[in-house]
Amino acid sequence: MFLKTLTRALLLLATLVSLGALAQAADPAEPYSIETQAPSVTVAADGTASVTFKVSGDFKWNRDYPAKITVDGSPRVVTLDKTVYKQLDGDFAIGAQDKEARVTIPFKGAASGNEKTALEAKFSICNASLCQIKKVALALEFTVR
């Protein structure tokens, strides 16, 4: 009896997992894009990197969500004033009609070289019927001459 129940449970689980995979594959493209930019600077020069979120379709940026960008680790070729940027602290500039959000990241060239620095973005976008909470891995590529 136990073996028969276990077999049925495993079959049900396998069916649910395969249906979930099909549902994910059928999802439309994400209703946002993210662009990162970091200008090339010389050693000891100041620069400003940016992360720009653009929301499309009937979605809008969620001003009420505690969005943030976290810099992973400590970059070698640049120094940063801080490593966490929070919407609720005023670090995000929200564009017209809540279709864009931008974070500027001041930095100073510390040593010559190229370096890709990992970031993690947590944010939310909403339409009239739902809000989506997103967690996305990003990177900034710093070049110091």
Image (cartoon, helix red, strand yellow):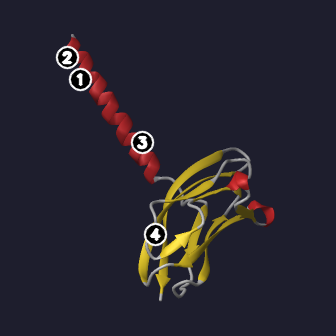
Is there a contact, CB below 8 Å, between mark 3 and mark 2?
Answer: no
Left or right? Give the position of 2 relative to 89. left
Which residue in the protein does label 2 denote?
3
Q: Earlier in the sequence, mark 3 or mark 2?
A: 2
Is residue 62 in view?
no
Is there a contact, CB below 8 Å, between mark 1 and mark 2?
Answer: yes
Which residue in the protein does label 3 denote?
20
Residue at (74, 64) in percent of width and height:
93
Q: Nearer the viewer, mark 4 or mark 1?
A: 4
Residue placed furthest toward the right: 96
Residue 75 numbered tag: 4
Is there a contact, CB below 8 Å, between mark 3 and mark 1?
Answer: no
Left or right? Give the position of 47 relative to 11. right
Q: Check disc 1 and report its element: helix, strand or loop.
A: helix
Spatial separation of the CA atoms under disc 4 and disc 1: 52 Å
Q: Check disc 3 and report its element: helix, strand or loop.
A: helix
Residue at (39, 46) in percent of width and height:
21
Three-letter code for the amino acid on which mark 2 is drawn:
Leu
Structural crowding at the residue carrying mark 3, measured as other residues with C-alpha within 10 Å and reported as few (<14), some (14–19) or many (≥20)? few
Spatial separation of the CA atoms under disc 1 and disc 2: 6 Å
Structural crowding at the residue carrying mark 1, measured as other residues with C-alpha within 10 Å and reported as few (<14), some (14–19) or many (≥20)? few
Three-letter code for the amino acid on which mark 4 is drawn:
Pro
Q: Nearer the viewer, mark 4 or mark 3?
A: 4
Structural crowding at the residue carrying mark 4, measured as other residues with C-alpha within 10 Å and reported as few (<14), some (14–19) or many (≥20)? some
Structural crowding at the residue carrying mark 2, measured as other residues with C-alpha within 10 Å and reported as few (<14), some (14–19) or many (≥20)? few
